[in-house]
Image (cartoon, coloured by chain):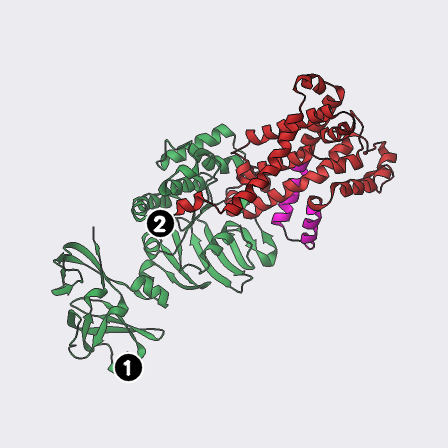
């Protein structure tokens, strides 16, 4: 089984240095997750062969693609990386079927055969009937699938997806997630997913690399990152408390606790989110405005830079975040009994399905 | 008067001074045309246009302007690509040299061509000795002079289009296995097609009306180097009716091109 190996060092003229080292084994989905401006697109360009790296090594098993020290550089057209670009980059003056057949034509496949194969892929992606349209006449979801077909039809060695869903509206995204998962699953080579959306990474990826400011800060499975985030960004990605329950007139009853929401009209199944920093910790019962106050015990303290992450026990196990100063001032240690308060306005609510 | 500003009224009623000056500007274009049309000897027109002088000049003008446009495409497009896409020392200087014919008086251009490519010119001399080919006073001279003056229009238009093009589509094409040549042919050119067409149109129009460089470099030999503008100039001295008739043909050809291409291409000019 082949593995894509990407040690990418790129020094941009503006002083930004990208330095990442990742492995993407065949038959698995590897996600590169990071905020905008972290250097994700540069990694895409380097692996696809659109940008020579300054140092490092990009190789697929024994086939070396880019090793500056050895003077090896295979250009994009000879790498066989299927790329689905962020804004798809469909060729505006070609029809859908011409777009999909383009890669085959470029490889010398006769026109008739190329069109036939392109049409097969369009059918597989549920795009029959759109063959003669131009990209400007497609919806976002259709364009995304055409881009996927165009990348897959050439039977690439590696599949690279750059923010495949982020240009889509929420409902289209939900609709396409399933289809995308299916096609990822069916692709046998290494699959690399570039995204800023943790949900996308957690959903699709077997292994996640977190990139921040040009550096990898974390790698592991979704659970590794969720349970032991190493940076503030990763913690933010993973650390939001999720509470599922049934709301009746703005009150969610969960674990014997009544959680008051800001809107008294909310009724039905809900998913409530609470930012760790929105949870206050007190040694004595707090008198004040927060409507949600309960007593619990600190199970564990996890330092996170100048902040401390507190894992709280029952009745509602949550993650809270306080400063180091507050922790020492209150003398918080594992096992301390504390009061917890959350303002109703700090609880995000969305309907759960 | 309404108190709230009304955009429609605003756009409907420009300041009076602008209207007067604008109409004056328009008159500058319309009055000469009217003057020309007023002098057209309508009844003699077929006979005037059937003379050898006119048919030779028309044929020569069409051949030379189309040839100049074709050469500009073949040579100017690569030049535009290099100027837009590559970085090399002296690039700005090269660009300046390419644009020079746009501002240079065509007569000066013609003289320069003569010194370089004339029978005793820098390259023209050895060329004539080696091959017997003499550029001045031949149709090749007409084509060369016309191309010299007209090609910058193509280069400048296409270079601008290439600069504004989102190069990522070309990158996408190469990830799909397309060679650089295929990318240029199937992705880049179609994407800049409107600008390319505008550039070709401008180049052709400039070539069709070329006078100064042609007369200086290629001379004014009827049937060999006398294009329509040259024929008009000569006829003005001797035979005004013929001059008017030829001018009318040129006006009609030019108008015909503008109308034929009106929305599709001129919009992006």
Question: Is residue A185 visible to us here?
Answer: yes
User: Dot 1: few (<14), some (14–19), or many (≥20) neighbours within 10 Å?
Assistant: few
User: Dot 2: few (<14), some (14–19), or many (≥20) neighbours within 10 Å?
Assistant: few
What SS does tag 2 mark?
A: loop
Chain assigned green: A
* Residue B2 lies in the magenta-colored region: no
Span colored in magenta:
B71-100
Q: What residue is shown with label 2?
A: B2
Q: Nearer the viewer, residue A42 or A7?
A: A42
**Quarter location, residue A259:** bottom left
Q: Chain of mark 2?
A: B
Q: Is mark 2 in CB contact (under 8 Å) with mark 1?
A: no
Q: Nearer the viewer, residue B66 or B262?
A: B262
**Quarter location, residue B75:** top right
Locate residue B132 relative to residue A201 in the image: left or right: right
Q: What residue is shown with label 1?
A: A328
Locate residue A260 relative to residue A307 in the image: left or right: left
Q: Position of residue B123 (x, y in %)?
A: 83, 41
Q: Position of residue B8 (x, y in %)?
A: 40, 44
Give the colour chain B carries in the figure: red
């Amino acid at each position: 089984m082949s593995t894509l190996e990407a040690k990418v060092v790129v020094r941009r003229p503006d002083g930004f240095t990208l330095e990442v080292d990742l492995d993407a084994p065949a038959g698995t989905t590897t996600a590169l997750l990071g905020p905008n401006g972290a250097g994700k697109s540069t990694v895409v360009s380097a692996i696809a062969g659109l940008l020579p790296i300054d140092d490092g090594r990009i190789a697929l098993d024994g086939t070396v693609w880019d090793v500056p020290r050895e003077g090896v550089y295979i250009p994009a057209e000879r790498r066989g990386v299927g790329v689905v670009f962020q804004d798809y980059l469909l060729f505006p003056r070609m029809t859908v079927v011409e777009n999909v057949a383009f890669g085959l034509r470029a490889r010398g496949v006769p026109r008739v055969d190329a069109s036939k194969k392109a049409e097969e892929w369009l059918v597989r992606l549920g795009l029959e009937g759109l063959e003669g349209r131009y990209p400007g006449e497609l919806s976002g979801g259709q364009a995304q699938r055409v881009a996927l077909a165009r990348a897959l039809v050439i039977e690439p060695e590696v599949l690279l997806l750059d923010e495949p869903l982020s240009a889509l509206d929420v409902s289209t995204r939900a609709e396409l997630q399933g289809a995308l998962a299916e096609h990822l699953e069916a692709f046998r080579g290494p699959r690399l997913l570039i995204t800023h959306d943790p949900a996308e990474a957690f959903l699709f990826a077997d292994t996640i690399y977190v990139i921040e400011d040009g550096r990898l800060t974390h790698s592991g499975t979704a659970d590794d990152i969720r349970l032991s985030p190493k940076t503030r960004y990763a913690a933010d990605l993973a650390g939001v408390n999720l509470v599922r329950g049934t709301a009746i007139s703005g009150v969610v009853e969960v674990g014997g606790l009544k959680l008051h929401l800001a809107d008294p009209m909310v009724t039905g199944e809900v998913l409530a989110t609470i930012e760790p920093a929105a949870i206050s910790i007190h040694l004595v019962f707090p008198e004040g405005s927060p409507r949600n106050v309960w007593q619990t015990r600190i199970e564990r303290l996890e330092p996170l830079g100048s902040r401390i992450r507190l894992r709280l026990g029952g009745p509602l196990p949550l993650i809270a975040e306080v400063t180091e100063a507050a922790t020492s001032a209150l003398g918080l240690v594992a096992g301390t009994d504390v009061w917890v308060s959350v303002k109703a306005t700090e609880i995000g609510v969305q309907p759960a399905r | 008067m309404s108190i709230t500003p009304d955009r429609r009224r605003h756009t409907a009623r420009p300041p009076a001074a602008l209207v007067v000056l604008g109409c004056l500007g328009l008159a500058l274009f319309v009055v000469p045309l009217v003057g020309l049309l007023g002098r057209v000897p309508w009844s003699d027109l077929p006979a005037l246009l059937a003379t050898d002088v006119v048919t030779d000049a028309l044929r020569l003008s069409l051949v030379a302007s189309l040839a100049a446009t074709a050469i500009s495409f073949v040579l100017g497009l690569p030049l535009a690509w290099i100027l837009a896409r590559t970085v090399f020392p002296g690039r700005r200087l090269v660009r300046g040299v390419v644009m020079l014919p746009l501002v240079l008086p065509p007569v000066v251009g013609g003289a320069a061509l003569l010194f370089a490519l004339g029978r005793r010119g820098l390259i023209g001399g050895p060329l004539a000795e080696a091959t017997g080919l003499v550029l001045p006073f031949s149709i090749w001279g007409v084509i060369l002079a016309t191309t010299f003056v007209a090609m910058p229009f193509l280069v400048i238009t296409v270079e601008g289009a290439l600069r504004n093009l989102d190069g990522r589509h070309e990158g996408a094409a190469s990830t799909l296995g397309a060679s650089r040549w295929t990318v240029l042919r199937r992705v880049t050119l179609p994407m800049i097609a409107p600008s390319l067409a505008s550039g070709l149109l401008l180049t052709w129009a400039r070539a069709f009306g070329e006078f100064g460089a042609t007369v200086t470099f290629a001379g004014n030999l009827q049937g060999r180097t006398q294009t329509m503008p040259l024929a008009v100039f000569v006829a003005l001295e001797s035979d005004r009716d013929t001059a008017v008739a030829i001018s009318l043909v040129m006006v009609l050809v030019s108008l015909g091109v503008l109308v034929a291409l009106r929305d599709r291409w001129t919009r992006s000019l």
